[in-house]
Every structure is written in structure tokens, then in C-alpha cells.
């Protein structure tokens, strides 16, 4: 009888726990609708990238145009090249990137730092491995709306020490853009975006809310875990369904690190020619012409060359 009572109580407690969990969860939890392994390929000069977005089987994920996990050793990198019509977000994980642009803006992005560059009408710059260490990081390209494509270029730079983070029960989040655990990033996202870097210790879980209609994806940096009901591991990109949030669990014995990125879709036509991303072919032709003739934002290209 005692024993029976115990079992019964256990069941009551269990169902209480699961109903509590149900209350805490989302109305429409997101699921993984596509999982792709990003394999290494050569890019730039001596650089290796794992392209997660901007590939044949995942052309874009509006408003995201490209995500590369890059790996460069000095003297390799991405020598003088232009951009127009979008933003680049460079997040260094290891080592450093030295950048310089045609307006004299330059600096070093170290591990943990973020450079949020709004190319707008035009930037020409170089991005090369700095120091003598292998550099690894992530570069995300976020599209700009037709109104913002030709804006003046702008930089938002955050050294690692200024990146706010939250910590709760073995889960750490660095808030690059947007909000998590009540912590807000100061970055202004012209195209509304969240960019979160999560670390989950073994045996922990986290529930992150995401605006319901935004497109969102995960890129796994290290370890393995359960994203919704899908198991994944390092170097995979996971496209999420619509929904109001995602449940992630680290059921593995090792730490799990991933980024969760979401953005409000622009729902505009996208025409891309390498580093120019516009709405129409005519605007692309114009960009190419402007670049070669050093006009409409590319004036400084006349005299500039990186050191
Ligand atoms: C680019 C090829 C490129 N991924 N990750 C063509 F490689 C690039 C480019 C980059 C890049 C730069 C960094 Cl620092 C990190 C990257 C591609 O610069 F812009 C075009 N058009
Ligand atoms: Fe660039």
C-alpha cells in the first residue's frame, strides 16, 4: 500500500512537473526544418570558409544573405574588395582580424569582439588575419531594405569587454544584438535582428523566445545538443520553422556552443552580384559601373590601396 501510494505520488509530481514545463514553454515552439553541414571551401586569399548561408541549397534566409565560419592564418585573408547594399557582422572567435577601409577607418577585431559594418552605398576594405595566430570567426551578411541600401556607411564596434551577457543555471549568453535573459545589446539593427552566442554546460537547457514571424537559424560552433527534437553538432546550420521560441538542451557530456540568429524578413527582391546586393539587375549594373568608375560612394577608390 505504502509503495503504491509512493508510485501514485510520483506520478502526480511528474505530471505536475510536465504541466509546469508546458506552461513555461511556447505556444508555437519552433522546429528544425533543414539541417546542413557546412563543409570547408577556399575563399579570398588563402582563407577557408564553411559557408552556412549563401549556398546552392540555402541561397538566402531573408534578411540573411551569407554566413561564413572563416579560418585564416597570416598572411591570408580577404584583400581589398567592395560592398554595397547590406551589412557585414564580423564576430571573431579566436585570433584577430586586421581591417582597413578606403576612408582611413582601420582597426583590429580580437577574439570576442564584434564589428557591425553597414556598408550602405559603398565600402572598400581589406580584412586580413592579424598577429601570427590562426584566426577563426563568423561573418554574417544582413540585407538592407531598399530605403537603406544607399545610406552613408556606418560602423558599430564592440570590444569583447563591452558585450553584455547573461548567466543562468549553467547557460551563458553573449548578446551581440537583440535581447536575451533580460540583457539588451546597444547595437542598432537597421534590419531588425537578434544575434545571440549561447554556451550550455552539459545537462542544461534553455528556452529562447524569438519574434514569431522572423526567420531564424542556429549555427553550431562546438559540441552537440538537441534543438527542439533535432540532434545536431558542430558546423551544422539549422533553419528553424516559424514560431515564438526555441527549446535547446545539452544532453551531451561536453559544453555546447552555438549562435542563434533571427531577423525580420524584408520581403523584397534580392539581386546579388558577389559583394553587391540590390533589388534589381539595373541597380547591380549601376553598382558595378560605380565601382569601376569610382563614383556614387566609391570616389575614394581612385587613390586608395590597403597597406
Ligand atoms: C567577398 C568572396 C569573399 N566570407 N568571411 C567574395 F570571400 C568575400 C569576403 C568574405 C569574408 C570576409 C571575412 Cl573577414 C570573413 C568572409 C567572405 O570578403 F566579400 C566576396 N564578394
Ligand atoms: Fe568585406
Image: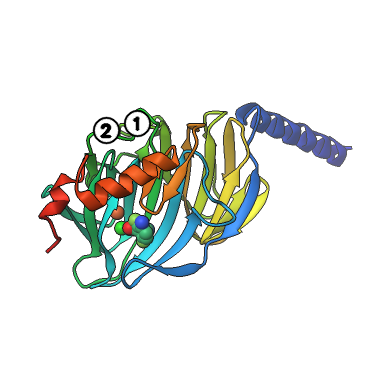
Residue 160 shows in the view: no
Q: Are marks 1 and 2 in contact (CB under 8 Å)?
A: yes
Q: Tell me which residue sits at (25%, 50%) in the image.
A: 291
Quarter holding residue 165: top left
Quadrant of the rendered image containing residue 195: top left
Viewport quadrant of the C terminus: bottom left
Question: Which of the four quarters of the rendered structure image does ligand 1 lie in?
Answer: bottom left
Which residue in the protein does label 1 denote? 190
User: Is the residue 109 above or below the residue 158 in the image?
Assistant: below
SS of the residue under disc 1: loop
**Local SS, label 2:** loop
Whole-angstrom CA distance, mark 1 to mark 2, is 11 Å
Callout 1 environment at 10 Å: few (<14), some (14 to 19), or many (20+)? few
Q: Tell how many labels.
A: 2
Q: Position of residue 101 (x, y in %)?
A: 17, 52
The residue under the point 59% across, 40% down is: 247
Q: Which residue is mark 2?
A: 151
Q: Is residue 93 visible?
A: yes
Residue 193: give x, y in percent of width and height.
42, 35
Q: Which one is in front, 174 or 109? A: 109
Amino acid at each position: 500500500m505504502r509503495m503504491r501510494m509512493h508510485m501514485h505520488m510520483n506520478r502526480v509530481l511528474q505530471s505536475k512537473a510536465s504541466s509546469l514545463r508546458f506552461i513555461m514553454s511556447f505556444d508555437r515552439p519552433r522546429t528544425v526544418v533543414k539541417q546542413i553541414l557546412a563543409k570547408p571551401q577556399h575563399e579570398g586569399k588563402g582563407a577557408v570558409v564553411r559557408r552556412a548561408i549563401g549556398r546552392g541549397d540555402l541561397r538566402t534566409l531573408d534578411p540573411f544573405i551569407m554566413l561564413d565560419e572563416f579560418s585564416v592564418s597570416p598572411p591570408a585573408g580577404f584583400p581589398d574588395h567592395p560592398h554595397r547594399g547590406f551589412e557585414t557582422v564580423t564576430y571573431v572567435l579566436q585570433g584577430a582580424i586586421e581591417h582597413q577601409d578606403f576612408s582611413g577607418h582601420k582597426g583590429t577585431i580580437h577574439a570576442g569582439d564584434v564589428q557591425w559594418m553597414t556598408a550602405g552605398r559603398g565600402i572598400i576594405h581589406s580584412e586580413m588575419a592579424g598577429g601570427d595566430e590562426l584566426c577563426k570567426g563568423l561573418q554574417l551578411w544582413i540585407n538592407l531594405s531598399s530605403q537603406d541600401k544607399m545610406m552613408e556607411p556606418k560602423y558599430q564596434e564592440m570590444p569583447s569587454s563591452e558585450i553584455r551577457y547573461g548567466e543562468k543555471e549553467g547557460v551563458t549568453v553573449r548578446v551581440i544584438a537583440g535581447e536575451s535573459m533580460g540583457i539588451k545589446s546597444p547595437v542598432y539593427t537597421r534590419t531588425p535582428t537578434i544575434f545571440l552566442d549561447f554556451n550550455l554546460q552539459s545537462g542544461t537547457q534553455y528556452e529562447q523566445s524569438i519574434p514569431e514571424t522572423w526567420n531564424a537559424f542556429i549555427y553550431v560552433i562546438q559540441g552537440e545538443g538537441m534543438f527542439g527534437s533535432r540532434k545536431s553538432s558542430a558546423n551544422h546550420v539549422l533553419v528553424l520553422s516559424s514560431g515564438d521560441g526555441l527549446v535547446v538542451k545539452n544532453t551531451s557530456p561536453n559544453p555546447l556552443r552555438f549562435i542563434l540568429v533571427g531577423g525580420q524578413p524584408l520581403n523584397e527582391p534580392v539581386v546579388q552580384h558577389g559583394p553587391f546586393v540590390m533589388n534589381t539587375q539595373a541597380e547591380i549594373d549601376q553598382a558595378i559601373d560605380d565601382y569601376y568608375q569610382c563614383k556614387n560612394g566609391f570616389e575614394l577608390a581612385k587613390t586608395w590601396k590597403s597597406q
